[in-house]
Amino acid sequence: MGEPTIRYDELSWPEMREAIARQPVVLLPFGTIEDHGPHLPINTDNVIVEALCLEAARRAPDDMLVMPVVPYGLDEHHMDFPGTVSVDMQTLLGYVSDVAISAARHGFTHLLVVNGHGSNAPLADLVARRVVLETGIVCGAMSPNAAIDPTLAEPTLSQMRSSGPGGVAHAGEYETALMLHLRPDLVHMERAVREMGQLKLTYFNWDQGEPSVLSWQDWWSRMSESGVCGDPTVATPEFGRAVFETTVDNLVRFVREFRTIPLRPRRDLH
């Protein structure tokens, strides 16, 4: 087949059969359509998560095959902002599971649900668990760019960061910088506003310097006037490029390690 094709949906069925034989990790990007302040498009999460998956696969084509992004997510709490699309959580759980299970039914043994939207995280976890229980394959969920992003803790990136605690949360410095790197044509920095209205106890406590045991998500319009929680005004494409490169490198290493998880037989110990 020559150089492996990294896009799942661009293969013919005979090519798919060959891909199954070499057993790459199948990546299923999982995003959403929601407000990202007045300066970013509502497809921000989809743009970022798909770009991360595709670039990782380009760098390790033997190890990965990328499915089309699931573009809608759990977003009822953002519906006060025009344009948001929300799918019922039960419907979403069934739908995303069916997509992943389809890949397993064809013979792929390792699949990752790659989440690009913070509120999808519990659903992505449940999807992965359901796939394991129903098919027996190795299926996991991870979030390279939403909510908790370990790359921001790395010295080089922390030194490049311009905002203080809370500044990278939602539509803040982190996502804005990534979009300036990936799709600058969609970013309107003249409209960017700094809004640090979130509380330390909220969903974004990870960027406040002190951890919280509380898991809580309010209606977004009660947390933010603009849709922003953070400081996008200091974002630069240089920071976005650095974050993107580091995240992709980390994702490649992670997927290669994930691929080595053995597919063990079950044992009935009754």
Image (cartoon, rainbow, N blue to C red):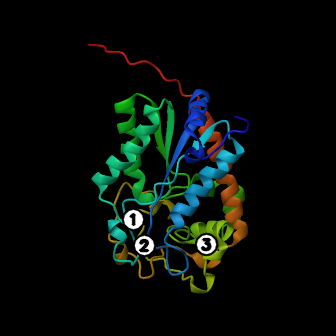
Q: Quadrant of the N terminus?
A: top right
**CB under 8 Å between discs 2 and 1:** yes
The CA span between labels 2 and 1 is 7 Å
Mark 1 is surrounded, within 10 Å at the Cα level, by few (under 14), some (14 to 19) or many (20 or more) other residues, namely some
Which amino acid, mark 3? Answer: Ser
Which amino acid, mark 1? Answer: Thr
Pointer 2: what residue? 198
**Residue 250, position as x, y percentages in the image:** 64, 46
Q: Quadrant of the C terminus?
A: top left
Judge left or right: residue 245 versus residue 167: right
Pointer 3: what residue? 163
Q: Quadrant of residue 192?
A: bottom right
Q: Residue furthest bottom?
A: 190
The CA span between labels 3 and 1 is 18 Å
Examine the rendering and report whether any part of residue 176 can be seen: yes
Q: Is residue 6 above or below residue 132?
A: below
User: Which tag, 2 or 3, sits closer to the chain's start?
Assistant: 3
Q: Which secondary structure lies at badge 1?
A: loop
Which amino acid, mark 2? Answer: Gln
Q: Residue furthest left?
A: 270
Q: Quadrant of residue 100?
A: top left
Q: Is residue 126 above or below residue 36?
A: above
Q: Which secondary structure lies at badge 2?
A: loop
Residue 258 is marked as none
Residue at the spot 54% in from the left edge and 40% down from the top edge? 26
Pointer 1: what residue? 202
**Residue 257, position as x, y percentages in the image:** 61, 34
User: Which tag, 3 or 1, sits closer to the chain's start?
Assistant: 3
Q: Which secondary structure lies at badge 3?
A: loop
Residue at the spot 45% in from the left edge and 81% down from the top edge? 226
Mark 2 is surrounded, within 10 Å at the Cα level, by few (under 14), some (14 to 19) or many (20 or more) other residues, namely many
**Residue 11, position as x, y percentages in the image:** 59, 42
